[in-house]
Image (cartoon, grey):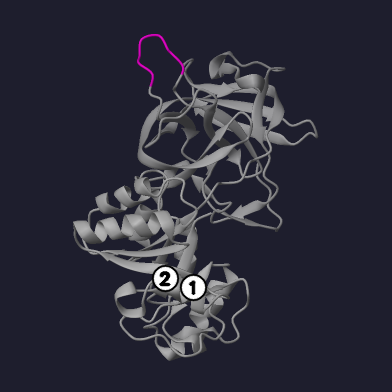
């Protein structure tokens, strides 16, 4: 999980309490201040980071956990660590040119903490630092102007910065930063569903979801007509007659269908847009968050597939009525939707909660 630090140095006093409570509630990793008094009363779950910028260090560090030093102002981090053995010491580097970039690389290789501020908008210097620090035990925390930049920083060179420091402008920014940090999406329990019936249901609109990611042969999206039952639709990674493979695409189903997105939410296929996030799921239930690049909605003949779980729960999926639209069975077997018949077994998932505007909710809800 990526580190999320909040810079509270310039937050208005009347808003600071609410923002800190938000940070605690969402289990952010740290807060940075230039005043140790700001750390009073904060729980041990929140790392307390002191950075005074161009000002000298205070005589007392209070509850400080991490001291960030600018060597030009505060002295060498090793000397500070010797004077403050109970505090972890890191280095601040503002990267503006080749010499400061080299200083950032040295810090990333040798220091416990490296707090880096890049003045140029390009992320090439950060890429260089991340590459230079490969295998180093310390952590790189990069200053981000906003959540949008934080998302980019977390993904640079696929590895990303170990953490981000961001100054929140309002309540809600801490929540958004934590969401941007993401992390591994949880595995899902897949079950074997037995097909009970299929029916040609006429014309309708179906959605092809084109992601910005190469999907694997055992990977696709969970899609269903009801919030409590979904079937694993395979990506177009398998060869087909008459057309090339499109390993970024899932022919996912009719536009009313649910699919899984981040934070335990669902989305209708009709809601997905460029930039939306959805879960790619493989036959072992492993998931990852992928970005939607495009959704193609077109009128096509549709087929309805009914299936049942081992405990009798009903699942339905409406797909384009064409042989090349496929779902996955046990062991990653690829099944053509138009050839499914009662008794065939497909893979699916059975969420427990009903849904309200995509969020799980415990209430009475009958879907039929």
Residue at image x 33%, y 86%?
55
Q: Residue at x 37, y 60 (%)?
A: 107
Left or right for 83, reference 160: right
Front residue (pair 257, 273): 273
Residue 334: quarter of image: top right
Q: Which mark is residue 81?
A: 1
Instruction: Identify the element where label 1 is drawn.
Output: helix
Tally of numbered tags = 2
The answer to whether the residues at label 2 and label 1 have Cβ atoms under 8 Å apart is yes
Q: Which corner quadrant holds the C terminus?
A: top right
Cα–Cα span, label 2 and label 1: 6 Å
Front-most of residues 168 and 87: 87
Residue 37: tell me if it is visible. yes
Q: How many C-alpha atoms fall within 10 Å of the one at disc 2: few (<14), some, or many (≥20)?
A: many
* Furthest residue in direction left, as rendered: 97
Q: Is residue 309 above or below residue 340?
A: below
In the picture as drawn, the residue positioned furthest to the top comes out as 241
What x and y, as percent, mark residue 308?
72, 30
Q: Which mark is residue 77?
A: 2
Q: Nearer the viewer, residue 14 or 342?
A: 14
Asked if residue 354 lies in the magenta stretch, the reply is no
- Horizontal side of 213 relative to 318 (left or right) equals left
Q: Which residue range is magenta in the image? A: 238-245
């Amino acid at each position: 999980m990526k580190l999320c630090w909040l810079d509270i140095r310039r937050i208005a006093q009347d808003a600071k309490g609410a923002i800190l409570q938000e940070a605690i509630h969402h289990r952010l990793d740290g807060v940075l201040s230039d005043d140790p008094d700001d750390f009073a009363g904060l729980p041990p779950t929140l790392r307390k980071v002191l950075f005074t910028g161009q000002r000298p260090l205070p005589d007392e560090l209070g509850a400080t956990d991490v001291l960030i030093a600018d060597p030009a102002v505060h002295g060498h981090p090793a000397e500070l660590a010797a004077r403050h053995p109970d505090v972890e010491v890191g280095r601040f580097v503002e990267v503006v040119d080749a010499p400061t970039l080299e200083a950032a690389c040295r810090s990333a290789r040798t220091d416990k903490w490296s707090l880096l501020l890049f003045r140029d908008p390009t992320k090439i210097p950060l890429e260089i630092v991340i590459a230079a620090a490969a295998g180093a035990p310390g952590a790189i925390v990069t200053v981000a102007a906003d959540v949008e930049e934080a998302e980019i920083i977390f993904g640079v060179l696929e590895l990303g910065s170990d953490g981000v420091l961001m100054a929140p402008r309002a309540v809600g920014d801490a929540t958004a930063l934590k969401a941007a940090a993401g992390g591994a999406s949880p595995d899902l329990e897949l079950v074997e569903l037995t097909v009970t019936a299929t029916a040609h249901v006429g014309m309708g609109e179906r959605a092809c979801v084109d992601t910005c990611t190469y999907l694997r042969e055992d990977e696709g999206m969970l899609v269903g007509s009801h919030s409590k039952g979904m079937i694993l639709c395979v990506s177009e990674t398998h060869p087909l007659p008459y057309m090339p493979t499109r390993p970024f695409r899932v022919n996912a189903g009719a536009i009313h269908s649910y699919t899984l997105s981040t934070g335990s939410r669902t989305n209708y296929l009709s809601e997905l847009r460029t930039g939306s996030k959805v879960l790619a799921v493989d036959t072992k239930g492993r998931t990852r968050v992928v970005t939607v690049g495009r959704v193609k909605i077109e009128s096509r003949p549709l087929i309805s597939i009914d299936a049942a779980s081992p405990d009798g729960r009903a699942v339905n999926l409406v797909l384009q009525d064409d042989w090349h639209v496929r779902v996955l069975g046990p062991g990653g077997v690829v099944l053509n939707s138009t050839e499914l018949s009662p008794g065939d077994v497909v893979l699916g998932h059975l969420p427990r909660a009903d849904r309200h505007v995509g969020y799980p909710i415990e209430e009475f809800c009958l879907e039929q």
